[in-house]
Image: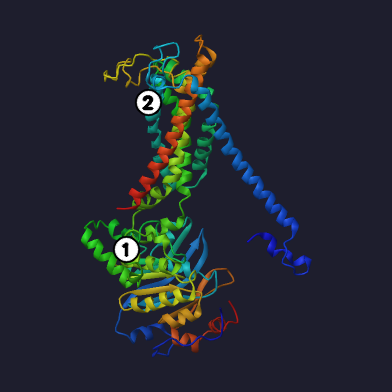
Amino acid sequence: MNAGTHSGRSDGGSLRGSSRAQLADTAATVTMWAIGGLVLLILGLIIVHFAIASLDVMSIGFLTGDTSESAVGGVFPIIWNSVYLLLFSLLLSLGILAGIYMSEYAARNRLTETIRFAEEAISSVPSIVVGMFGLILFVDTVHLPFCMLAGVLALTIFNLPLMTRLAEQALQAVPQSERQASLALGATKWQTIRHVVVPLGIPGLITGVILTAGRVFGEAAVLLFTAGQSVSTNLDFTNFNITDAASPYSPFRQGASLAVYVWDLNSNSINPYAHQIANGVAMVLIAIVLIFNLGARGLGRVLTRKLTAA
Amino acid sequence: MTTTIAQPAIRRVEVGTSKVADETASTAAGIKITAEHVWVKYNGKAAVRDVTVEIRERSILALIGPSGSGKSTFLRCFNRMNDLIPGASVEGDVCLDGENVQDQGVSAVELRRRVGMVFQRPNPFPMSIYENVAYGPRRRGMGDKARLDDLVETSLKRAALWDEVKDDFRKKSGLALSGGQQQRLCIARVLATDPEVILMDEPASALDPVSTLRIEELMRELREQYTIVIVTHNMQQAARVSDITAFFTMGEDRAGYLVEVGATGRMFTNPTERLTEDYISGRFG
């Protein structure tokens, strides 16, 4: 029950709660509801705003067409670039392995504490700085062209440490009693990790993947200097030669992501419909992010079920 | 619940000397576990001081004593769960069938398959009842479905849980059971790994009285096949289920030590040590 019913001793044994405690309880509840409601409201406003604003350009053609098809054109190549970057950066999930090491094997000492600090510090470096660093390292020094590969590598600089840290936290949240139960049954450490710790940590791991890989969608600053701003047109999906920079599958191809395209439209474009197109692209971006989040959570549920059975 | 002297346990015959050796000699069964001069230290500080005790095969040893007397820590020496605690070290000899479990060559994994453990809080995995029981055997590589099915059913029956779950044990989550059922599931899970010894760390302390009695009945049944060591705060429980009782207390150095060990009936009616008498009569602890 609420705190009030227990604190009524001062007014002569009456069961009526102390008004101060009850007031504080009510105030806290209302505040938290309000903040929670505000978060939902903001999300709702963003979606509704861009859904309406994008009506000017939104059509099947906008989603499937090429940028050069008409004055408005389509954004399919840009969507392709973003999805390509995303799938490429799912390799970041390798950070989960590092997270498993940090959570289950690494000793707690000065060195590992320093690593944890570094992981968090790197992931909070402003992305424009990471972009510049990527430019210097991958383009100027390693002599990669502006390309998807350079973009993904630059993203990895701050995403991989973050993925590692989030994975470690996800696994640390698995109760120690579950590990003990498994070990006491004669399971090896690896079996315990494989059959208990990781399956139970999946919701947290999925959150980590969403936060990091999902960041690829929103990231413009890092990609500006590394993957380039080229608005690819006329993608030839029959060209499977991945060493050819013209192939849509090639990591050496230059291409703008959705977020870079929004930035480009709003700052450089001479297209008279730039603003409307930007609204449309923003809506597409929001939709893809939502689909990705929901898809990842659904996948997480399936994974948990698969891993804890058999 | 610390009341006066508990009733001597059911069907107690041997009442007598204080020496464990005499008591064990009186039975045909051999010694399953010996602990000799066992110390457990956390970062060099003793938590268990110089404990020597023998455990007969197919008997129940109860470790009783106040909080902080090192009972659980001592229990964890038998399956080397103390290995998992950073800074913990065990000195002295703990032997299972004459083999020192602390030896370099002994695999903790193999040891824990022979020495199972039930924890204070029921901790089933968030999986189906079936998968909970099949967990140990699967990790040992048992993949044959018919054999697993058999083993799961037998284990659930032995743990007196089968009748309550037989209709939905393949689908129902282990977490959907009541506390007492969960603990019996944890016992079934241990039985499925075919252990020789079962360690129980206050297995009924989180359960209601009815569930507690069921666990105790179960322990008496399991005693026919297994060697059981139980840590308990509940003296009536020790009196009801155990054959031998070991009383621990905490010394001035805050290390737990063994005060006295003997046949349960005698320990509760005629303890040798003043400390034991004070504890079981509720004057301390």
Outermost residue on the top side: it is A270
Q: Type of residue at label 1?
A: Arg
Q: Is residue A91 left or right of residue A20?
A: left
10 Å neighbourhood of mark 1: few (<14), some, or many (≥20)?
Answer: many
Disc assigned to residue B65: none
Mark 2: secondary structure: helix
Above or below B109: residue B38:
below
Q: Is residue A305 left or right of residue A171?
A: left
Above or below A106: residue A185:
below
Q: Chain of mark 2?
A: A
Mark 1: secondary structure: helix
Q: Is residue B183 visible?
A: yes
Above or below A9: residue A283:
above
Task: Name the one closer to the observer, B256 or B131.
Answer: B131
| Residue B8 in picture, x, y percent from top left | 46, 88
Work out which quarter of the rendered image holds the N terminus of chain B and state it: bottom right
Count the numbered circles shown.
2
Residue position marked by numbered label 1 in the rendering: B113
Residue position marked by numbered label 2 in the rendering: A84
| Residue A245 in picture, x, y percent from top left | 33, 15
Above or below B156: residue A115:
above
Residue depicted at 44% across the width and 84% down the height: B264
- Tell me the distance, in whole angstroms, between the alpha carbons under discs 2 and 1: 48 Å
Q: Chain of mark 1?
A: B
Work out which quarter of the rendered image holds the C terminus of chain B and state it: bottom right
Q: Nearer the viewer, mark 2 or mark 1?
A: 2
Task: Name the one closer to the observer, A260 or A145.
Answer: A260
Residue depicted at 40% across the width and 23% down the height: A79
